[in-house]
Amino acid sequence: MSDSSPSWRQRAARGTYSLLLRLLEPVYVLRLWWRGRAEPLYRHAIGERLGAYDGAASSGWVWVHAVSLGETRAAAALIDALRARRPGMRLLLTHGTATGREAGSVLLREGDAQAWLPYDTPSVVQRFFAQFDPAVGVLMETEIWPNLLMAAQAASVPMVLANARLSVKSHAQGQRLAAVMRPAAESIALVLAQTEADAVRLRDVGGREVIVCGNLKFDVSPDPALIARGRAWHELIGRDVVLAAVFREGEEAMLLAAWAELQSTSSTRRPLLIVVPRHPQRFDEVAALIRNAGLTLARRSAWGDTPDASAMQADAWLGDSMGEMPLYYGASQVALLGGSFAPLGGQNLIEAAACGCPVVMGPHTFNFAEAAVLSLAAGAAVRVADMKEGLKEALTLLAPERQQQFAQNALAFASQHRGAAARMADRIAAFVPLV
């Protein structure tokens, strides 16, 4: 184990890192303002990003940082488990993205607070801790910020990395940046890892106390009302439905090319294609791609609880809504997993399984490596080499008997691995005083 005081090389590396961030601060603020054109929430309370807060300073918060939508949904299960153990706790919830902050707002109770994660320069993070002085800080998944963690250590705030994961690629990057990242990782009081493989890599980059607890995403229960509405939609649609779930930039073009080839070789009526992009700022772009591919399009935002007549006749739907993934999974018989057909690591396949929707995933699933392996072993998913093969496999899963078996396997797989929220909450609650 290394000496707790940083070496001159580590101090110099963090100084260089901090200087670079200070120089880039105007670019950071301009980028937030630019993103606010499509997502106005990015322009809300920008001062919080720079350590400027309304209200008097306070202390004793249980601080949870969930950068984006996926982390916020996972954090919901952990927050519920923490409230069960510490009913009087006051939650401070921070985020880095507009989708995360919007989803997090529904998790707040009276007395809780929400803010943006501070920019990672020494003065800004020091102002954050002076304002809030948490009893404990919980960072979700991969959020290791050197100056934030050093400021927490100086303020005697114990930090926990929860639902922690570290891919092989990120591990290699962390080793290259060890002079900055190792002291930060060593300052974390407790690391609660998703898998044993994650734990090994997290220890290697400096994690001291690392415990395997499982994946919180298995504890997230999809809204049953949304699933039921989706299934009702499926009955109204009256044909097969294939979902492109949480697709990333570049994947839609691959999908539409494969879909066009299907059109030219099939004499039967094609399934309805539902495309749900990962990022809301791409909704209009993806709508244009679908129309340019010669497909008639209906946008989810154009109707209310029930699809209108034009939607029923459309070749494709664009899922341009937020918080409705269980609805789309309920309406579909099979899902192509976004982020897995381009080298982006894959999106959350656990949510699809919990909705009883079989998954076809591409070769790139390093963000959910163990979950992908387990889902394959459980017969809840299929892995393919590319989009063309993925679409062919998805069509074979439309056969009723095969689809039903995979759907049952998916539900069993999702329920089998629950319990991470309770295990993590037991550990974190030790840092939270009884109120």
Image (cartoon, grey):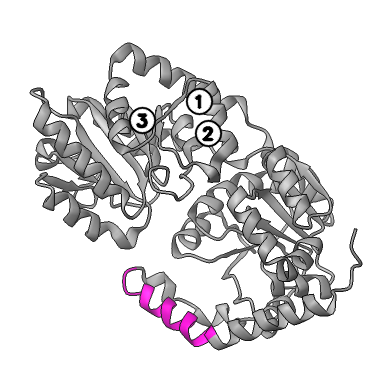
Numbered badge on residue 228? 3
Disc 1 secondary structure class: helix
Q: Quadrant of the N terminus?
A: bottom right
Measured Cα–Cα span from mark 3 to mark 2: 26 Å
Numbered badge on residue 372? 2
Q: Which of disc 1 and disc 3 is earlier in sequence?
A: 3
What is the count of numbered marks?
Answer: 3
Q: Is residue 126 visible?
A: no
The answer to which image quadrant residue 15 occupies is bottom right
Which residue: 32% across, 69% down?
38
Residue type, label 1? Leu
Report which residue position mark 1 lands on: 376
Q: What range of the chain is rendered magenta?
A: 24-38
Measured Cα–Cα span from mark 3 to mark 1: 26 Å
> x and y percent of residue 3 in the render?
92, 67
Is residue 198 placed above or below 237 in the rendered structure?
Answer: below
Residue type, label 3? Ala
Q: Residues within 10 Å of mark 3 (few under 14, many from 20)?
A: some
Considering depth in this image, is 26 or 41 the residue closer to the camera? 26
Disc 3 secondary structure class: helix
Residue 25 lies within the magenta run = yes
Numbered badge on residue 187? none
Residues at circles 2 and 1 in contact by the CB criterion of under 8 Å: yes
- The nearer-to-camera label among 3 and 1 is 1
Q: Residues within 10 Å of mark 2 (few under 14, many from 20)?
A: many
Q: Quadrant of the C terminus?
A: bottom right
Which residue: 49% across, 87% down?
26
Disc 2 secondary structure class: helix
Considering depth in this image, is 375 or 427 the residue closer to the camera? 375
